[in-house]
Image: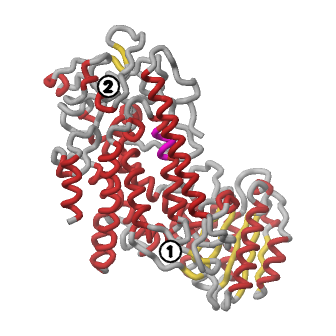
Amino acid sequence: MAMYVLLCLALAIRGVFSFFPTQESGKFGDYSHQSITERALYESAAVFIRTYIITGNKYASRSPINVTEDFFRGDRSYEAVFGTVVETMVWGNNNAQRMYAGVPMRTMNAEMIFAGNLLLQSLRDQIIVLSLSPTPDWNNVRKLIGEYLFTVQMFYSNTNWVETFGNATCQELGIRGRSLMPTAPPDVAACAGCTYSHPQIDKHSCENNILVNGQYLTSGYLSTQGIPKPAGNFSNGLGKCSHGGKDDAFSDVNAIGGINKETSDSSLSPHFFLHHTAGEAAVSSTVQFFVGEVTGLLDQLGPRLFGELIGLPVACKDCLKPGLSLAYVIDTSLSMSIDFEQIKSKVTETIQSSLLENKTMPSDFILSTFSDPVSLNTIRNTTDGYEMISWIRDLKQEGGGDCPEYSFNGLLAALRIIRPGSCLFFYSDADPKDPELEHEVLQMAAQKQIHIAFLIKGTCNTGIPFLARLENATKATCLKQTLDKARNIRSAEDKMIHQAWSKLHSFQKVPDSGNHKPAVVLVGMGVVFLVSLMAAVVLHTHRTPGKRPPATEHSQVS
């Protein structure tokens, strides 16, 4: 039934200019919103299964589809839930295409790339906030994700990103605080005319028609979207780019031709020869949205919430069980000055709340500190949680001077006395200065089955991912340091320390006034309204000859 609905939706929007909504609505073998989203979800699920559900070597060399097929073969109930998740997100994606196909900032057309990126930032923020609410409505979140992905995928088929960077993903797209390449100003000709007849297009006559690659982002104007293509004072044959295709009247307006890559059909897509590249970039960007390091939903929400989102819940490792140690390994060098007090505060709060609320506690606490020189390293353990709090509060910074620190010495000291199966939380912003100890650290952590979580990670640009290798070798499902009585929205202070706090589910008790979710959602709606208002201003500017938008409009994203 769900596939029938998707097919009907596809037929209803058959004339839309973008990736086709479903495989059935386009040319066989072409990328569609459905195929892009489905493949990205299966790849993301495979990453999640390998990392948080079935760790080790079982799936190390298997393809994503083989990983998911094998996993679902063991429990068909997961397959049914995951299938519903995929259908819901695809529905949201295709519904966005039906509703917003005529809105240039939604499709990244008419050089509305700045406004489209602001919209993506707002949607992404709403997705994260709603997912972190005390009782997430996952069905609505999944539909919102589909809406978000529609515009993300349009970026690759409709702008000149692929012509400039190939199948690489745009790391700045939709991420608040990161700046996109500027969009071509109104008085800059973005395209040259090309011979626009079907036989010539088949011979790649429009292959080199974009003039601003590497300097500006641009996108084509589409006659059905309501924004006139600017005439400008351009040289003969030059002008703004058209979207292109047999149904785009702007294809015959200077600059003649078009640049869209949404299909492999040359009658619809002048840059049909880049359709595969655009599709692969869209898949990679969608995967990045789900499981990309730091900015992906997996890191933003943590394993348990992300598992619920995609229908693959995992059990968390309880770090506070009797018979276990609770270990902290902390960099006390002067380079940690920005984060140090926040770390102390968070660790103290975690242990204190556990002492007050938990009926069961770990058998002992371990505190290992390290710096440079190695003589400053310390190791202590106690069965008294309040003594551990006192040690944390009294920590002082000293040593350092260059970037690497003696972190493996600090880890080894804790690993030698930690109880098997325990959790160890690591904080450092530098690479190890004692890399010769890597094998011993890995071996001991594996033998004792220690779950190491990296709350702060940094690098000295050595190019050798020592800590990444250790993290990958010892990563647990998810780790609980405090009671999980209710999901609470993380405070700004938590975010400042590192997004990885959420990966460990060390939930902070926040007084609940009963207003958190509505207030945040209202803010999100306000941002969407602001983006729409900005789009209207840009639209008015395009309709008014001789007026240019402010110079800063395309230069940065806040």
Position of residue 277 measured from the top left corner of the image (x, y, whole percent): 31, 41
In the depicted view, which residue is nearer to us: 460 or 221?
A: 221
Can residue 437 be seen here? The reply is: yes
What label sits on residue 230 in the rendered view? none
In the image, taking residue 369 as reference, residue 35 lies left or right, namely: left
Q: State how far apart marks 1 and 2 are (Cα).
A: 49 Å
260 shown above or below 209: below
* Snapshot quadrant of residue 81: bottom left
Q: Position of residue 132 (x, y in %)?
A: 54, 65
Local packing at callout 1 (Cα closer than 10 Å; few below 14, some 14-19, many 20+) is many
Q: Quadrant of residue 78?
A: bottom left
First to last magenta residue range: 116-120
> Which callout, 1 or 2, points to the residue nearer the camera?
2
- The residue where tag 2 is placed is 242
Report the residue marked by disc 1.
477
Foreground residue among 554 and 426: 554
